[in-house]
Image: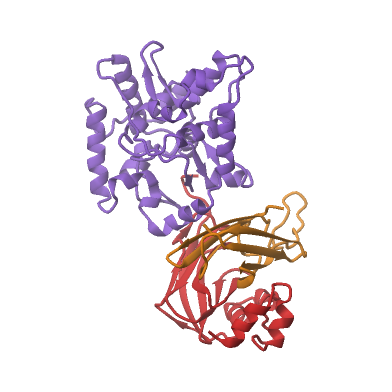
């Protein structure tokens, strides 16, 4: 409650893109048109490469890292976690199904019974809790290795977030996520859209702002910045870890990880990459 | 192929390189393949770095050299640099970062089997020119690219 | 010691070799945050690449090559199955080498 008050005091609520509720496919169509006009030289499927698709010279750093990807050992750890049974003898396969390649593409999704958006990391934790295991923290560390490995099993598949239009709860969660994305917040009074739609492709000091389309395809992501902070040991982070960081960067109070705000945001955010190819994990700045 | 060079490649192992190289007359004693060129790395200016590693500081810019490096370094400690060239008879390549305390980052001696290509990652303390100098047929040619090194951005 | 990873691939008569080495590559200029004292220089000084026992390339490195250094070069005349050997020596006299087959 306190957090909501703080952000309400600090923000001007401005609904971006469309004033009326258009729905997921209309929103994506409008955004796609906008991005293709803004970046006429970028092939639509290349948006998954983020800022590297916009700047070939910058991309040399990404290509250089991918010669010997820094995250291979961590992916092995992720696979090991997937294969390790719980104390009760069951495993992640009992929650998610035995085929790990079929998991990533299902999330995020609306659960009509619990009336909540489910994310992959959220469901990993739910699986642990349901089996009496101590739940992993959801921003970095083992959950990122496991989620990255699961996502890597789905490489080549297309993101396909479903918002059932006949379920008002799902539609409302999607709309809440969209509103979050377009709402200015923090002392810097900026919305996600300010950087990743209206100023995408521009420099924010030393950073080249990535467009929102294609942003989620490569999460959990290995960030050079996160790796440097650990002396090169671990650059992995989940999508909501990045939400946390982005909110802090505009000097807004971050929301609870895997809470309703970030999960609704993820529901919208991932929708805007529908049709893009999963290429996880990947290296970013 | 230079006959002396071929003889060197056939007879020398890494350990025996120094003595063999000098005795076959392939290399000048003060710039011996395989011996660490501490002097060149100690040079505090670009000219000293290039003459120390390649024998001369007279070089001309050449379009035949492709120098690939980012315009803005994401991380000044890891700046990827790739040097390639269509020139023939390339014997050596040096990579210099003009504003580093010791501008010579590295120098590569290529046997005739090698293509004129080298790629590595260097440290740059600040915005500076990266200069790739190639020695081909005894002459020096260069390509230069400015790499901006900034601290921090807004994406964190 | 396994401080050297090698990937070598032959295509159309040219072999591309990529190698990643584990090494602190200290310049000797960096200060220890806790003690304030300079960390002594400790970096690879020479890298040698051999193909079928012949030295095909030597690299002289200074401290300005990045930590956990990367190097790639290309040469003609290698074939799938041939052995490539990469060796390094550092300023403290430590060394390592690794062999790998060209794919």
The residue located at (57%, 70%) in the rendering is B99
Horizontal arrangement in the rendering, residue B107 relative to residue B150 (left or right): right
Which of the 4 image quarters holds residue A17? top left
Asked whether B139 or A251 is in front, the reply is B139
> Chain coloured red: which letter?
B
Which of the 4 image quarters holds residue B38? bottom right
Horizontal arrangement in the rendering, residue C8 relative to residue A38 (left or right): right
Q: Where A247 sits versus B72, above or below?
A: above
Which x, y percent locates residue A278?
39, 38
The residue located at (35%, 43%) in the rendering is A211
Residue farthest to the top?
A113
The residue located at (25%, 51%) in the rendering is A40
Which of the 4 image quarters holds residue C46? bottom right
State how the image is colored: by chain
Q: Where C70 sits versus A25, above or below?
A: below
Q: Where A90 sits versus C7, above or below?
A: above
Horizontal arrangement in the rendering, residue A96 relative to residue A161 (left or right): right
Which x, y percent locates residue C20?
59, 56
Which x, y percent locates residue A43?
28, 49
Label tally: 0
Residue A191 in view here: no
Residue farthest to the bottom?
B25
Hue of chain C?
orange
Asked whether C10 or B89 is in front, the reply is C10
Residue B73 in view here: yes
Which x, y percent locates residue B15?
73, 72
Hue of chain A?
purple
Horizontal arrangement in the rendering, residue B81 relative to residue A116 (left or right): right
């Amino acid at each position: 409650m306190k957090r909501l008050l703080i952000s309400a005091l600090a923000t001007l609520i401005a609904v971006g893109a469309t004033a009326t509720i258009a729905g997921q496919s209309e929103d994506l169509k409008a955004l796609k048109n906008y991005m293709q006009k803004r970046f006429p030289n970028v092939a639509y499927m290349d948006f998954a490469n983020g800022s590297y698709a916009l700047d070939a010279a910058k991309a040399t750093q990404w290509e250089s890292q991918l010669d010997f990807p820094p995250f291979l050992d961590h992916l092995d750890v992720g696979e090991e976690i997937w294969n390790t049974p719980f104390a009760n003898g069951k495993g992640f396969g009992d929650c998610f199904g035995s085929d790990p390649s079929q998991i990533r593409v299902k999330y995020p999704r609306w659960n009509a019974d619990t009336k909540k958006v489910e994310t992959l990391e959220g469901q990993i934790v739910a699986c642990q809790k349901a089996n009496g295991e101590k739940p992993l923290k959801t921003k970095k560390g083992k959950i990122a290795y496991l989620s990255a490995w699961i996502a890597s099993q789905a490489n080549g598949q297309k993101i396909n977030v479903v918002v059932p239009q006949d379920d008002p709860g799902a539609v409302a969660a999607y709309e809440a996520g969209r509103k979050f994305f377009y709402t200015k917040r923090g002392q810097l009074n900026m919305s996600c859209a300010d950087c990743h739609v209206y100023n995408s492709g521009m420099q924010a000091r030393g950073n080249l702002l990535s467009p929102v389309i294609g942003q989620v395809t490569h999460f959990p992501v290995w960030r050079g910045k996160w790796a440097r902070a650990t002396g090169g040991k671990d650059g992995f982070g989940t999508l909501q870890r990045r939400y946390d960081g982005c909110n802090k960067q505009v000097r807004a109070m971050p929301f609870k990880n895997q809470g309703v705000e970030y999960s609704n945001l993820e529901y919208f955010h991932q929708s805007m990459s529908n049709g893009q190819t999963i290429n996880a994990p990947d290296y970013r700045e | 192929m230079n006959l002396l060079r071929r003889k060197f490649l056939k007879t020398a192992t890494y350990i025996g390189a120094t003595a063999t190289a000098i005795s076959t007359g392939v290399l000048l004693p003060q710039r011996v393949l395989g011996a660490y060129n501490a002097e060149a790395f100690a040079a505090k200016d670009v000219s000293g770095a290039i003459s120390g590693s390649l024998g001369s500081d007279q070089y001309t810019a050449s379009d035949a050299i492709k120098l690939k490096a980012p315009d803005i370094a994401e991380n000044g400690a890891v700046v990827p640099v790739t040097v390639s060239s269509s020139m023939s008879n390339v014997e050596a390549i040096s990579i210099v970062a003009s504003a580093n305390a010791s501008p010579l980052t590295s120098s590569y001696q290529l046997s005739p089997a090698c293509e004129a290509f080298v790629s590595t990652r260097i440290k740059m303390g600040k915005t500076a020119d990266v200069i790739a100098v190639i020695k081909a047929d005894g002459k020096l040619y260069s390509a230069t690219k400015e790499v901006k090194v900034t601290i921090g951005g807004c994406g964190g | 010691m396994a401080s050297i990873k090698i990937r070598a691939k032959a295509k159309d008569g040219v072999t591309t070799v990529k190698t990643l080495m584990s090494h602190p590559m200290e310049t000797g200029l960096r200060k220890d945050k806790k003690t304030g004292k300079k960390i002594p220089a400790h970096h690879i000084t020479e890298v040698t690449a051999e193909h079928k026992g012949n030295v095909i390339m030597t690299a002289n490195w200074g401290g300005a090559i990045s930590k956990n250094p990367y190097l790639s070069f290309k040469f003609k005349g290698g074939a799938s199955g041939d052995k490539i050997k990469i060796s390094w020596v550092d300023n403290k006299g430590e060394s390592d080498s690794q062999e790998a087959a060209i794919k």
